[in-house]
Image (cartoon, coloured by chain):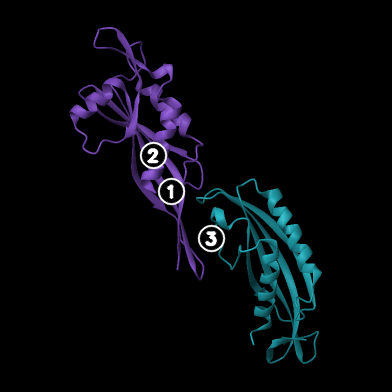
Chain colours: A cyan, B purple
Amino acid sequence: MSHVRSQILQTVAGVMELVTPGKVFGSVHPITPDTMPGISLYWVSNAANTATVIGGTERPMRMMTDIYVDGIDGDEAADEIARQIELQLFADETVGGVAIGVLDAGSRIEHDDSTAVAHTVLRQAWDIIYRTIDGDPEHGM
Amino acid sequence: MIADIEQGIIARLQAEISGIAQIVKMMAGPDGNPVAVPVQIKSYPPTPNDMTLKTLASAGSVLVRYTGSRYGKARKGTSWMVQDRMMLFEILIVSDSLLTSASATGIYSMLDLAGTRLMGYQPSGATGVIELVQDDYVAETKGSWEYGLIISVPTQRKVDL
């Protein structure tokens, strides 16, 4: 069985497929015309809080959903995808039964015309809160 | 891909500037009467020489050739790899006159027109629009002037791993 972190990402990837079918990637997005609009899904940090759970650890995982849209004027299109992502994530805050909550950790937008395909990226940060029993990283409490 | 994009650029120039009055040169026909000679627009000749250039310059010519590419840093996934490729083409303007007159097709006019009509155009196979990079004097050979306009065409290469 995989780490709860991986389970969360796999579940979220499945949910993201509902938003941009066939265009969900890991931390590197191809930035090609045929892969946009698309989502890059990855985690960047995972804190550990042992004080709140006896015999276990509460682990807020910072997860990113970067939305890539063709063109540097893609703000509205990116926002529409951001809306759909939020609806999907909060539809099941347990993320398939392994987490205890989802928090919106903010977002920012970037415009890049330095690549061969000018594009807009809306980077959304999420904190997925989950708990594990010490020594057992495979099961959420 | 290179030949396809070069042909796209040539087709664009042919459609946009070949026949416009501003750069049509009036030359004497076989019967002595003036004949309107449109600017020639084509790929760079495979074996250019002084005589070729002289002929091209007499009517005024716009020649297109690929000069190379700059590649961006590769983006890699587990099953794919993508690199941005900025292709550069030279639009070589050849004429026996710098300024446009009643009997001459001015190189400055052609240079400006070529840039204006190519800027913002997206050839088939490109991922974005053409940008102008620079123009410059290239050479003068026995009265045949050559100026070059460098343009960039954004493209990509993608392979499955």
Task: Name the amino acid, label 2.
Answer: Gln
Q: Which quadrant would the N terminus of chain A be assigned to in this image? A: bottom right
Q: Nearer the viewer, mark 2 or mark 1?
A: 2
Between residue B61 and residue A3, name the one nearer to us: B61
Q: Is residue B97 left or right of residue A115?
A: left
* Cα distance between the residues tagged 2 and 3: 28 Å
Q: Is residue B137 left or right of residue B125?
A: left
Query: Could you classify mark 3 by the number of other residues whose Cα lies within 10 Å: few (under 14), some (14-19), or many (20 or more)?
Result: many
Vertical arrangement, residue A60 with respect to residue A35, above or below? below
Task: State which quadrant residue B20 falls in.
Answer: top left
**Residue B7's disc number:** 2
Vertical arrangement, residue B78 with respect to residue A59, above or below? above
Asked whether the beta carbons under mark 2 and mark 3 sit within 8 Å of each other, the answer is no
Give the residue number, with chain letter if any, for mark 1.
B86
Secondary element under disc 3, as helix, strand or loop, is: loop
Q: Position of residue A107 (x, y in %)?
A: 71, 59
Vertical arrangement, residue A15 with respect to residue B155, above or below? below
Asked whether the beta carbons under mark 2 and mark 1 sit within 8 Å of each other, the answer is no
